[in-house]
Every structure is written in C-alpha cells, then in structure tokens.
Amino acid sequence: MSFPSNLAVVICHGSYHSPAPYLPLVDAFKARGVDAYCPQLPTADLTKLNVGDISKPDFDREPPSGGYPQGEEDTEAVLGVLKPLIQDQGKKVLIIGHSAGGWVATQAAQPE
C-alpha cells in the first residue's frame, strides 16, 4: 500500500500510559514512509509526578512541588510536534487519540 509523502500521524496515548505500547505502530507507519510520532504526555510522565523510583513508583507520595502537570501541558506537547509538521513541512496530519488522549488530540486540533 502506498501513502502520500505529505502524510504524518501523531498518536496521543491515554492517561497512565507511555508511548512504549505504540512504538510498533509508529515503526510500522515509518516503514511505509509515513512520518509518525507518539509524544510523551506530561500528565502521564512518571518523571514529573513525584513517584520516586519510576521502575517501582510510589503513588502515595506528596504532589510535586510545582503541582501535577495539567491537560494544557499535554496539548502543548502535542502542538510541539504538530506545528513543525504542518507549518514548516506542509504535512497533512492524522491525529489518533486513545482514551484520554482523545481529549488532547481534540484540543491540539483546534484551529488557531
């Protein structure tokens, strides 16, 4: 199957997920010549949630000193991928949202 060269895919993972489960899909798109991305959303980034050792997270700890990341930060992370694709490279972008990633995808897709 052939895809247009100006196509890109951005996947927005759900809450409490990371990009890791989506990497085989990202790689499959790339193998077919489609730019594909799945950025880490700050609200699900254990390094920003004050959980201690991220390999054995402790979710009973106090909130981070600056507070937990909010949905707007997730949107900004996705826009950081979208804007160069659209504005600089002229790509047509398909945004895929899983679970709460659908909210992020919807927010990021709003016209400016």
Image (spheres, rainbow, N blue to C red):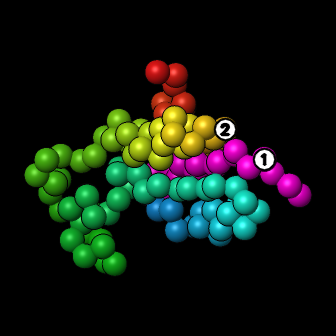
Residue drawn at x 18%, y 46% is: 67
| Drawn side of residue 18 relative to residue 60, left or right | right
Tell me the quadrant of the picture where the N terminus can be found.
bottom right
Foreground residue among 32 and 98: 32
Q: Is residue 5 magenta?
A: yes
| Res 73 seen here | yes
Q: Main secondary structure of the magenta part?
A: loop
Residue drawn at x 47%, y 47% is: 81
Q: Check disc 2 and give the amino acid type.
A: Lys
Residue drawn at x 64%, y 49% is: 9
Dividing the picture into quarters, in which one does residue 49 lie? bottom left
| Drawn side of residue 62 relative to residue 53, left or right | left
Foreground residue among 48 and 4: 4
Q: SS at mark 2? A: strand
Q: Check disc 1 and give the amino acid type.
A: Pro
Would you place residue 54 above or below residue 85 in this image?
below
1 and 2 marks in contact (CB < 8 Å): yes
- Measuring from the top left, give residue 32's x and y in whole percent: 76, 62
Dividing the picture into quarters, in which one does residue 40 lie? bottom left
What range of the chain is rendered magenta?
Answer: 1-17
Dividing the picture into quarters, in which one does residue 93 lie? top right
- Measuring from the top left, give residue 60's x and y in whole percent: 22, 62
Q: Residues within 10 Å of mark 2 (few under 14, many from 20)?
A: some
Would you place residue 108 above or below residue 69 in this image?
above
| Drawn side of residue 10 relative to residue 48, left or right | right
- Measuring from the top left, give residue 88's x and y in whole percent: 51, 40
In the rendered structure, which disc, 1 or 2, sits on the residue that comes first in sequence?
1
Q: Which residue is mark 1?
A: 4
Distance of mark 1 from mark 2, alpha carbons? 9 Å
Residue at the extreme left: 65
Numbered circle sitting on residue 92? 2
Q: Residues within 10 Å of mark 1 (few under 14, many from 20)?
A: few
